[in-house]
Amino acid sequence: MGSNGNLSPLPPASSPSLILAQPTQGERDRTARHTYPNWGGALTEDGYLQRETYLTTVPLARDGGITHWILTVDGGVPDERPILSSCESLRKRAVYARPSGNGEGERVVVEGVAHGIASVFTEPAFRGKGYASRMMKEVGEKLEGWQARAAGAAEEKKGVEAVEKGSSLFSVLYSDIGKTFYAKNGWAPFESTHVSIKPVKGAAPTEGQGVKVLGYHELAELCAADEKQLRADLARPGGSRTKVAILPELDAMLWHLMREDYMTKAIFGKTPTIRGAVTGEAGKRVWAIWMRGYYGGLKKPEGNVLHVLRVVVEGPEQPEETLADGLRAILQIAQHEAAEWRTEDIQIWNPNPKLRSVIDKTGIQYQLVNRDTDSIASLRWYGEKEQTSELDWVANEKFAWC
Ligand SMILES: CC(C)(COP(=O)(O)OP(=O)(O)OC[C@H]1O[C@@H](n2cnc3c(N)ncnc32)[C@H](O)[C@@H]1OP(=O)(O)O)[C@@H](O)C(=O)NCCC(=O)NCCS
């Protein structure tokens, strides 16, 4: 069965003969040819297929970090069976912190794995029959135990508590079809706002304002410092709610940056050198890491966005005016880069109240957008103690997207 169209009659979505399977390379290519019109606009079809394969070899995805999933029929012959719906999942390091229950307000930080689900797709001929819903049910259950044990064991060696071994902590996805479909299937919508800033050519501050641009080689140290500060924040005593986070580690950034490299090479014939900017002395730094995302390419530039993957304020007790001076210089570099690289928007996802206040003080014009259709951050919790509504998702920024 070379095409998906000649399965007759189609099995109902509730049929016990439907299974979740991992596609062959040929089946992945077949799926990519179907998804190309939706997601490949900035590339040729072959370039898009090559990118999808390349994206299995980059940090986070390599070594089995990415898993492709299809809904198909039990006993079907690989490469000939129908692909009724498809998606992929990406393993990510994650933590949660909840009150220890010792009555002293202490919090216990638990290590583990989260999975990001992406590229949920049913080809047009099969839509509206419940296949994506069935696949999400299967995937949601499968990911609870998927690749979770290994992380628990590794963390155990480091002496960090890893309760609920053998279970992933949670899975996330970013819905482009509103808040209802995935909520019905188990993923609850969380805050999905962003600060939107316009690109400005020439906005970059002049030398001597204490701001430095960031290349690949600076990111490792910054991500390590970020993770350390985030863990300390999560462990800080107080508060009754459970906090969950995907860790803003180097590999999480590299996944985006290597994707960006592929896209910019295809579109501009070159890759950017400036991946963010930092100001301030050690312990009091402010930085932002960003990547340029292209959907429509240069034909439809309105879909091109410079995404701020992560903003970090080290030493948040500094005066907001000082922080704002630093952030202003960083954002001006972002504005210039965004214009240079033909993007039409700069987005900072889910800025916390502190960051919002600092952005206000930079004097840079921005809009706060509350998304209700695209990139709705959604989370399914695998823990037993809390309901999803009892969770705070911290560091819910673009770096966690896939
Ligand atoms: C979204 C998609 C995967 C649904 O696949 P499907 O197999 O038809 O899904 P199901 O039959 O299980 O469920 C269909 C439901 O999805 C909803 N849906 C489909 N497209 C939608 C959209 N653009 N906006 C909102 N809801 C949508 C339908 O309204 C329907 O809702 P209902 O269950 O209340 O009737 C499919 O339409 C698709 O591949 N679309 C293009 C790619 C895409 O947008 N993927 C999602 C990325 S987050």
Image (spheres, helix red, strand yellow):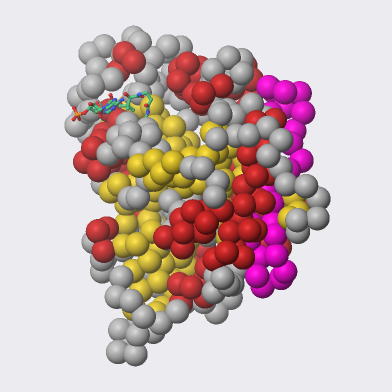
**Image x and y of residue 384, in percent:** 26, 65
On the rendered structure, is 85 left or right of 17?
right
Query: Compared with residue 372, is residue 362 higher up or lower down, i.e. above or below?
Result: below
Q: In the displayed orientation, state which residue is furthest to the right.
A: 207
Query: How far across and down, in percent of the image, does residue 74 sit?
Result: 33, 30
Picture residue at 34% right of the left edge, 15% below the top: 124
Report ligand 1 position as a quadrant. Answer: top left
The range drawn in magenta is 263-288
**Residue situated in front as seen by the camera: 124 or 215:** 215
User: Foreground residue, 380 or 13?
Assistant: 380
Q: Quadrant of residue 345?
A: top right
Q: Is residue 169 magenta?
A: no
Image vertical order of residue 213 relative to residue 40, above or below: below
Q: Kindly indicate the quadrant of the structure image that contains residue 311.
A: bottom right
Q: Is residue 266 magenta?
A: yes
Is residue 61 toward the left or the right of residue 265 in the image?
left
The front one of 158 and 270 is 270
